[in-house]
Image: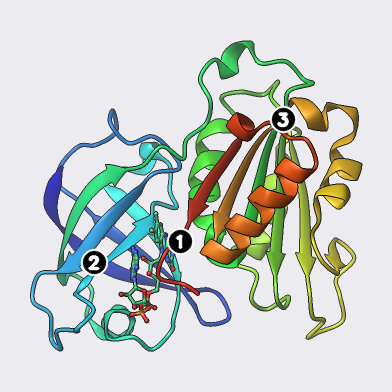
Amino acid sequence: METVGSFSRKGLVAENTLFFQIEIPQDIKDRFIPGQYVHMEWVTPVAPEEKGDGRDFSIASPPEEWPRLSFATRLTGSAFKKHLEDFPDGTPIRVSGPYGEFTLPSGLEERKWNEPVVLIAGGIGITPFRSILLHALGRFPSVPFFLFTTNRTVKSIPFLDELRNLARNQKNLFLEQIVSKTDIPLPPDLESGILTPDRMFEAIGERAKNGDYYIAGTPSLVSSFSTALEGSHIRHERIHADPFFGYP
Ligand SMILES: Cc1cc2nc3c(=O)[nH]c(=O)nc-3n(C[C@H](O)[C@H](O)[C@H](O)COP(=O)(O)OP(=O)(O)OC[C@H]3O[C@@H](n4cnc5c(N)ncnc54)[C@H](O)[C@@H]3O)c2cc1C
C-alpha cells in the first residue's frame, strides 16, 4: 500500500517524545498486523535532507483504530523531526507499508497459561508493543503477557500512565518498568537498575523457558538482549528482534 495521509500532532507522551497520528484513506485493517511499521515521507519537504526525507516508524495503534494510525518518536532535532514539531495539522505525508514480521505467533487461541509472551521495550521501542497489547490483551485473555520497559529516567518513559492503567485493568498483563537513573523520587510501581534476563526470569517464573521473547528499541539494545537471552538458553526461534535502525 502506498497512500497520502493527513498528519496531526497529538502532544508529548514523555519528555521530548511526540505522539502523532496520520489519517489514511486506504483501508488496511485486514492487512495490518500489530507489530508492523510503515515508511513515511513528507510530500513537500521544506528542507530536503542529505539523509533522505523518509523514516520508518512502528505503528503504535491497533488496526481497529483505522483510519487513524498512531506513532511516537523521540525528538532529536533532525530536519524530519523538526517538521513533525512544526508542520500544521492536515499536512500531507506519504505512507507505505505496513511491513515487517515482528508480529505475534499464530495459534494464540490455543496457547496455554505456561507459554507467556514476553515483550521487552527499550525506550521508544514501546511503539509496536502498544499496538500489540491494545489489540491482543482482550482477545486472548488466557495468554499471559509480560511487558518489561527500560528507560533512562521516569520522565522519559513513554505512555507511563496509559501502561499503568492497562496493567490495572487487564489481568493477563504483567508490567515491570525499570529506570537506570532516578530523576525524581521513584514511584512505588517503578523499579531502578538494569534489566537482565535473570531479572525477567524471576518475574516470569518456571514458564520463562516456554516463552516467546520480543525485543524492540535501538539496534545495540536489541542485539545485546538477543545475545543475553540466547546465553540463557532461550531458543533462537523464540527470540524476535525489532531493531530501530537510525538510532545509535
Ligand atoms: C522497523 C523500524 C521501526 C522504527 N520505529 C520507530 C518508532 O516507532 N519511533 C521512532 O522514533 N523511531 C523508529 N525507528 C527509527 C526511525 O526510522 C529513525 O531512524 C529514528 O527515529 C531517528 O531518526 P532521526 O531523524 O531522529 O535521526 P537522523 O539523525 O536524521 O538519522 C539517524 C541516522 O540513521 C540513518 N537512518 C535513518 N533511518 C534508517 C534506517 N531505517 N535504516 C538505516 N539507517 C537509517 C540515517 O541515514 C542517519 O544517518 C524505526 C526504525 C525501523 C527500522
Above or below 222: residue 26: above
The answer to whether residue 137 shows anywhere in this view is no
Label 3 sits on a secondary structure element that is: loop
Above or below 127: residue 65: above
Above or below 154: residue 169: above
Q: Tell whether label 2 touches label 3 (CB within 8 Å).
A: no
User: What x and y, as percent, mark residue 120?
Assistant: 66, 51
- Quarter holding the N terminus is top left
Residue at coordinates 71% horizontally, 64% vertically from top-left?
150
Above or below 112: residue 29: below
Q: Tell whether label 1 touches label 2 (CB within 8 Å).
A: no
Q: Quadrant of residue 56?
A: bottom left
Residue type marked 3: Gly
- Tag of residue 244: 1
User: What x and y, as percent, mark residue 149?
Assistant: 69, 58
User: What x and y, as percent, mark residue 158?
Assistant: 59, 67
Residue type marked 1: Phe
Q: Which residue is outermost to the left?
A: 44
Residue type marked 2: Phe
Q: Is mark 3 within 8 Å of ligand 1?
A: no
Residue at coordinates 73% horizontally, 35% vertically from top-left?
234
Residue designated by label 3:
211
Q: In the rendered structure, which disc, 2 or 1, sits on the residue that comes first in sequence?
A: 2
Q: Is mark 1 within 8 Å of ligand 1?
A: yes
User: How is the model colour-coded?
Assistant: rainbow
Q: Quadrant of residue 72?
A: bottom left
Q: Is mark 2 within 8 Å of ligand 1?
A: no
Label 2 sits on a secondary structure element that is: strand
Question: Which class describes the residues within 10 Å of circle 1: few (<14), some (14-19), or many (20+)?
Answer: some
